[in-house]
Amino acid sequence: MSSGFKVYDSAKKLPDTWDKIAEKHIFIKKDFLIFLESVNYCRQNYHINEKESIIMVSYKLKLNLLTFSSRFKLNFTITIIGIPLSIACTGFVCGKDGLKILSSYLKQFPLVLILNTEGELPIPKAYTLSSYSMELKKDFYSLFNSLKSRYRRRLKIALAKLDNLKITKLYKKDFSKEHYDLYEQVYERSEGKLEKLSIEFFKNMDAELYQIHGKNGILLAFFQVKQVDRDLIFMFCGVDRENNIKYDTYLNMLIYILKLAYAGHCRRLHLGQTCGYSKSRLGAEKDEKYMHLASCIIPDFICKILLNILGKRREE
């Protein structure tokens, strides 16, 4: 397997040209990949074609192949093209002129699943979980008033419970097993489970943490956000399911994150995948994402059949 690609088994070994190709894609830059190896090692490999300015991250994961489409399980260790982080970004950087070269390279693998693309690769594809983002209008109240009346009513109900909540900054050194247990609750309920992050990820990731307590002092939730230039990214959270309805914890969390975006003078808020209905209430728009399947031993028409099983139905 070559096609002009060189493969590295450690991010520390990557050449300087890697970051030049990555440019603004922060989650595929060398320093972040080194960090990710230290807290979430998944047998990552790094592929670079310097001539064509293509970079790609692959990793191994024991995956339920029906994770995006069914409650049934079919566990299988597979090579994935993506960042082992469960966020809505692709695991490669490639210009339009290099897509055919990248696709040819992917077809040299026995079986590979490519996640969270815009559908640009000329190989079999299917829908996967959509991501949600929003362009920020003048201010929070302008945005609020622009929402549909039923959404405004729902947000008012949630905001009425805000007096019962205390939202504070959480220092990374204080991130505890109690916080992590809430993350595990969300992970176990999540649609499309992939890798589960370690507690060390939250203790060391270069991002901001906040926590939410009820009036009685009980920990209800935490969340993690990262600002990059004028974009705010909602990364992960943990929520106590038992008290979520009582306090409207999740919706109040989203409202607070939206206010943080305005306070940081952000132009766009990225709210990630899953829970699309709650995010739509804030005015977030759906960005469709795709998965692809490539193989050197399985014909494309069989890959298409497999993707019909693996993929998610298009969200209306």
Image: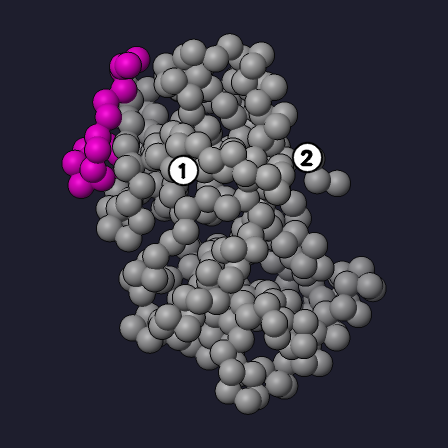
Which numbered disc, 1 or 2, marks the residue that appears first in the sequence? 1
Q: Which residue is mark 1?
A: 62
Disc 1 residue type (three-letter): Lys
Q: Which picture quadrant has residue 93? A: top left
Q: Which residue is mark 2?
A: 313
Q: Is residue 141 above or below residue 313?
A: below
Q: Quadrant of the N terminus?
A: top left
Q: Nearer the viewer, residue 297 or 259?
A: 297
Q: Nearer the viewer, residue 144 or 158?
A: 158
Q: Is residue 142 above or below residue 32?
A: below
Magenta span includes 16: yes
Kindly state the secondary structure of the residue where label 2 is placed: loop
Q: Position of residue 85 (x, y in %)?
A: 40, 47
Look at the image and name its color scheme.
Answer: one colour
Disc 2 residue type (three-letter): Arg
Residue depicted at x 51% and y 10%: 299
Q: How many marks?
A: 2
**Residue range corresponding to the magenta coloring:** 1-19
